[in-house]
Image (cartoon, rainbow, N blue to C red):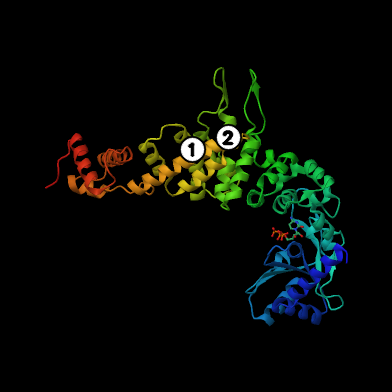
Amino acid sequence: MDKRTVLETVLRDEIMQLLSSPALDCIRETVQSENVRAYIIGGYVRDLILQRTSSDIDIVVEGSGIDVAEKVAEKLGVQVNVFKNFGTAMLRTREMEIEFVGARKESYRRESRKPIVENGSLEDDQNRRDFTINALAISLNRADTGSLVDPFDGIGDLERKLIRTPQNPDITFSDDPLRMMRAIRFASQLNFSIVDDTFEAIQRNAGRIEIISGERICDELNKIIMSEKPSAGFELLEKSGLLKLIFPQLALLQGVESKNGMKHKDNFEHTLQVLDNVADRSDSLWLRWAALLHDIAKPATKKFDETAGWTFHGHEFIGSKMIPGIFKHLKLPLNDRMRYVQKLVLLHLRPIVLAQEEVSDSAIRRLLFDAGDDIDDLMLLCDADITSKNRKTVDRHLANFQLVRTKLKEIEEKDAVRNFQPPVSGEIIMKTYGIGPGREVGTIKNAIKEAILDGIIKNSYDEAFQFMKAEAEKLGLKQAQ
Ligand code: CTP
């Protein structure tokens, strides 16, 4: 048996197993009794062949998808959501989410991605899809149940790991410019290549991305960031010309300048390497965003000093200030996720400084206080930030960070400042001195916090209370009776 036949046999078994599930069995029976033709189509078929798990099934019906969905929902005893404007209907069983749509023939207007939709055949519908690997269909019809309809050799492209449009790529991308991002996202997610003429069309049509909403672009960016090796996707975004349009601040990191024989590193390449390093160790989207943004202010802070060479002083501070603008522009959430990224960007040099110096307990305490529960993520980012090609340098830095970690653990066990709560509250201060809220309470609270962080007093109620008394005296406060 050749390779292809083996694949088809394995696939046939999987397809038959899928079609015998209660929901699909019911759909098949309905389609056949209603005398319409229907197919499973798109991403589900692709993922089935790639053996990726997916629970979203799209069914395309040559006729009314809504009618079939309503009949199926009635038989299965589940709710159906109908979207009349789009001609689609969705129902949810315990195992899957199934969307029904009528087969379409679409043409698009240049100024908008809202298509003019006409009813069409399966062939029309496959023709308007984005990539050959997303145009595969499985028949649910009596005559050929379970057979694959693959007019563009999508199976071949899955085997060869290729992203290719089924039609002239200029038309496919101009129909829906988001597909340019999708091509790069699939390449990054699946570790596929984009065939030359499809990629060249992305380069030619990149400017059309402007008609796509920020939210849809952001979804694709997040999927690229979550892929196993996100640098692959960002390199393609850069090469295609899309990056400078959708995320100019990141594109600006690119390039190396040389003066008096001194060069700085390419901050784009470095950032992507840090992102890959973090991706190897963590599935957190926001930690990955922090990696992508940790050096974002390097272009804005770059200076050349005759003796020190290239410097980027304050890039961590300016970078953290740039985050809200970037999040807003990219339609990312302006909430605690954003503040987490800001915090990691702001603090990303602190452990490096600590690792270089004789580490004082007070510096460690301050880092614990500032990072709080995000200290482990910060340390992971710092490890990932070591991208030297010299193994000895890498090992030295890693060993230094290990030392910082040991110190952090010791101090936290001793002083518990990671989630610092003032041992003497504002209420106690006000009650003790018979005063209301105001500047004095803040001054005393801050002095107590600083004394604890500097190791002058212990993080305990008794020592803090004594310290409060001394501070209050300096302010001329008298204890209330
Ligand atoms: N599709 C398309 N053009 C788009 C979006 C989607 O042609 N801009 C088609 C593709 O055939 C795709 C199907 O619609 O397979 C379903 O789209 P979607 O659910 O967005 O993506 P999936 O391919 O299922 O992949 P994922 O779930 O990873 O997004």
Q: Is residue 407 above or below residue 124?
A: above
Q: Are marks 2 and 1 in contact (CB under 8 Å)?
A: no
Q: The residue under label 1 is which amino acid type? A: Asn
Q: Which residue is mark 1?
A: 400
Position of 156 with respect to 345 (left or right) is right
**SS state under label 2:** helix
Q: Is residue 151 above or below residue 357?
A: below
Q: Residue 107: percent from the left, percent from the top? A: 82, 56
Position of 112 with respect to 300 (left or right) is right
Q: Is residue 392 above or below residue 57?
A: above
Is tag 2's residue or tag 1's residue first in the polypeptide sequence? 2
**Mark 1 close to ligand 1, CB under 8 Å:** no
Q: Residue 415: percent from the left, percent from the top? A: 33, 46
Crowd class of label 2 (few under 14; some 14 to 19; many from 20; radius 10 Å):
few
Q: Which residue is mark 2?
A: 392
Crowd class of label 1 (few under 14; some 14 to 19; many from 20; radius 10 Å):
some
Q: Residue 108: percent from the left, percent from the top? A: 79, 54
Where's ligand 1: which quadrant? Answer: bottom right
- The quarter of the image holding the N terminus is bottom right
Residue at the image point whose x is 22% and y is 47% from the top: 462
Separation (CA) of disc 2 from disc 1: 12 Å
Position of 275 with respect to 432 (left or right) is right
- Is residue 67 at all visible to an observer of this figure? no
Residue at the image point whose x is 82% and y is 70% from the top: 9
Q: Nearer the viewer, residue 208 or 396?
A: 396
Q: Nearer the viewer, residue 273 or 165?
A: 273
In this view, the mark in front (2 or 1): 2
Q: The residue under label 2 is which amino acid type? A: Lys
